[in-house]
Amino acid sequence: MDWKRFGALTQLPGVPGAEGEVRGALRQELSQYTEEKVQDRLGSLFGVKRGTKDHPRVMVAGHMDEVGFMVTRITEQGFLKFQPLGGWWGQVMLAQRVQVVTRAGKRIPGVIGSTPPHLLNEESRKKPVDIKEMFIDIGVDHEDEAYAIGVRPGDMIVPVCPVVEMEGGKRLMTKAVDNRFGCAMALELLDDLTTMNHPNTVYAGATVQEEVGLRGAVTSAQTVNPDVFFAVDAGPAGDTPGVKDGFGALGKGVVIRLFDRSMVPLPGMRRFLVETAEEEGIPYQFFVSQGGTDAGAVHKTGRGVPSAAIGVCARYIHSHAAVVDKDDILATKRFLASLVQRLDQDRLDQIRLG
């Protein structure tokens, strides 16, 4: 597992609709493993690894975009008003550091602010601050100064959190685990396939604009036309104080989604996933989510694509910092390689029949 590459991917800026830096890094990494690449017109990108058979066509995807923000207006005093991109909860945002990325690629530091409690009446202090009332302070005194350093409406804003190996060395804290983790897993799979026979053709890469409605999954599935699809993503962990009946705990292995609001996997797919994990000795856990993944869009492509969502659980996703377990990531890496190695046409027929 290339941990340095994983960390570097998390640090790249890439909100929905502005994933160019992430795509550029992925394209460079993909070239290590294959000369054949496929890109749709929204920017989703896949490397192709051909095995002993043309079919099944196996599509494996993370997504490039992270939750972030967009500059919508610059006030006369030089503060930035913004639009969330992806699902944000206002209570995790105040006083957090951000970077504004200009069209020229300049990174401008800032902090999310609001009216301080000292200046609020007692009733207002008791209420959560609405995102519409927040702003970003980039250290200038006038809108002309903001324009002079290159800030414009439409610029992307990303959270700031460096990669930190936590005490004990088992867990990592960083931004954009959701879903540079999936991007890293697609690259790790292609790396594994360089020394592994597989009875299929694999398209491994990443989609765009997942966090704003699974948009890249739609166009990339129409481009690849897969026979089977695996979304590789990070979901919220349910093992922290205050969570009752939560699914997903760090250190318990790869996550297999039983249900979310975007898709219910076929019974044959569930059996294939569980049998593979158990026969390969890969730790796994089940997950039920109120969210969704790219599998929710891909499985409705054409006449239907058997799909599954797998990955890891991560604490504090859709905030500035997430925490993941290294062993869970390694389990996912092994799981993906095992699934691809086993997925021939006979196995796909079994999955389709249920």
Image: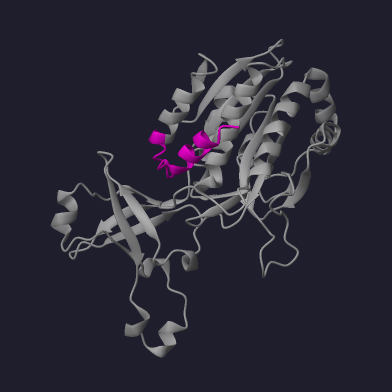
Question: Is residue 136 shown above or below 151?
Answer: below
- Whether residue 316 is visible: yes
Residue stretch rendered in magenta on the structure: 1-21
User: Which quadrant: the N terminus?
Assistant: top right
**In the image, what residue occupies the spot 20% across and 46% down?**
150
- State how the image is colored: one colour
Question: Is residue 204 shown above or below 81?
Answer: above
- Whether residue 304 is visible: no
**In the image, what residue occupies the spot 78% across and 23% down?**
342
Q: How many marks?
A: 0
Which quadrant of the structure image shows residue 62? Answer: top right
Residue 197 or residue 348, whichever sits in front? 197
- Horizontal side of 81 relative to 158 (left or right) equals left
Residue 20 inside the magenta-drawn segment: yes
Residue at the outermost front position: 168
* Residue 344 on image: x %, y %: 78, 19
User: Which quadrant: the C terminus?
Assistant: top right
- Horizontal side of 195 relative to 209 (left or right) equals right
**In the image, what residue occupies the spot 67% across and 51% down?**
261
Residue 331 or residue 169, whichever sits in front? 169
Which quadrant of the structure image shows residue 140? Answer: bottom left
Residue at the outermost top position: 52
* Residue 205 on image: x %, y %: 55, 29
**In the image, what residue occupies the spot 54% across and 21% down?**
47
Question: Is residue 274 shown above or below 123?
Answer: above
